[in-house]
Amino acid sequence: MTKKNLLMYIGIGIILVMFFTAIFAPILAPYNPREISLPDRFMSPSSAHWFGSDNDGSDVLSKVIYGARISISVAFTVVTISLFIGLTVGSIAGYFGGTLDQTIMRFIDMLYAFPGFLLAIALVAVLGPSIQNLIFAMCVTGWTGYARLVRGEFLHLKTREYVQSAISLGANPLRVIMVHIWPNLTGPLVVQASFGMAATIISESSLSFLGLGTPPTEPSWGGLLNAGRKFLVEAPFISIFPGLAIILLVLGFNLFGDGLRDRLDPKKN
């Protein structure tokens, strides 16, 4: 087993553990993450509270476990919606070309002119902090990267002999796209989606840290970082553990995407 394969499998392991944690959060969390116990405020990590307790006496470990649900669900939803829109738009632009392609690409370039994170901040600030608005704000520009990737692949794949043969035999565009081209996009899109998951988790945590993501009543990693920054001297563990969770999950997706990209690269095989 090569080093790249080992790192990819480590990334897969981290992702699976985080997904397992998110799915079984009600079982794994030792306490209710919203439970307030003022006598237990700022307890250091111990057998009673493995990750310590915050300024409300709530168990930090329970909040970190439930925070995985929010980060993973938001990232998965954003990537799925963005991937679907990007695949559809990129396929239309790449297959038909011409004026339609140029119009779509100029619109994408216009969206690229706006920094995605700053645009998300502006949208959430206007619409109000909620999970739905957070997802919408990140999807506004999130699909453009997938559209450009798909369009580029289409320009290459539609010139292949098997695609030209299908067209010459009278196959309609929808069949050509779905049967002959889309299956060849699976690898690049999975790699792009893996890196997209990592980027979305960082964006969601950043917006929640700024108070523009999930509501304060919902335990999220970014919200925990924001809550713990006021108590870094007396209780640094409030911010340390959710920060480590973000780093670990982002590392997992990046290792998986990097390893998968190398495995699918014909020049390295």
Image: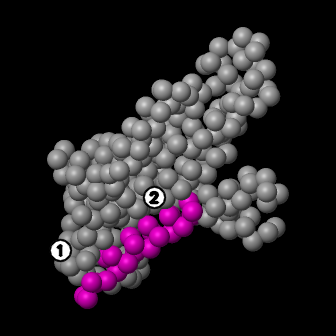
Q: Is residue 26 visible?
A: no
Q: Is residue 247 above or below residue 32?
A: below
170 and 249: which is toward the camera: 170
Residue 199 shows which numbered tag? 2
Marks 2 and 1, how far apart in space? 36 Å
Q: How many labels sit on residues?
A: 2
For residue 256, the mark is none
Q: Residue at x 44, y 33 (%)?
A: 104
* Residue 144 x %, y %: 45, 43
Q: Is residue 204 left or right of residue 41?
A: right
Quadrant, the C terminus? bottom right
Labels 2 and 1 touching (C-beta < 8 A): no
Residue carrying label 1:
38
Going by the numbered disc 2, the residue's amino acid type is Ala
Mark 2 or mark 1: which comes first in sequence?
A: 1
| Quadrant of residue 12 within the rendered picture | bottom right
Percent position (x, y) of residue 251? 54, 67
Residue 9 vs residue 41, the one in the foreground? 9
- Residues in magenta, as a range: 232-254
Q: Residue at x 47, y 70 (%)?
A: 247
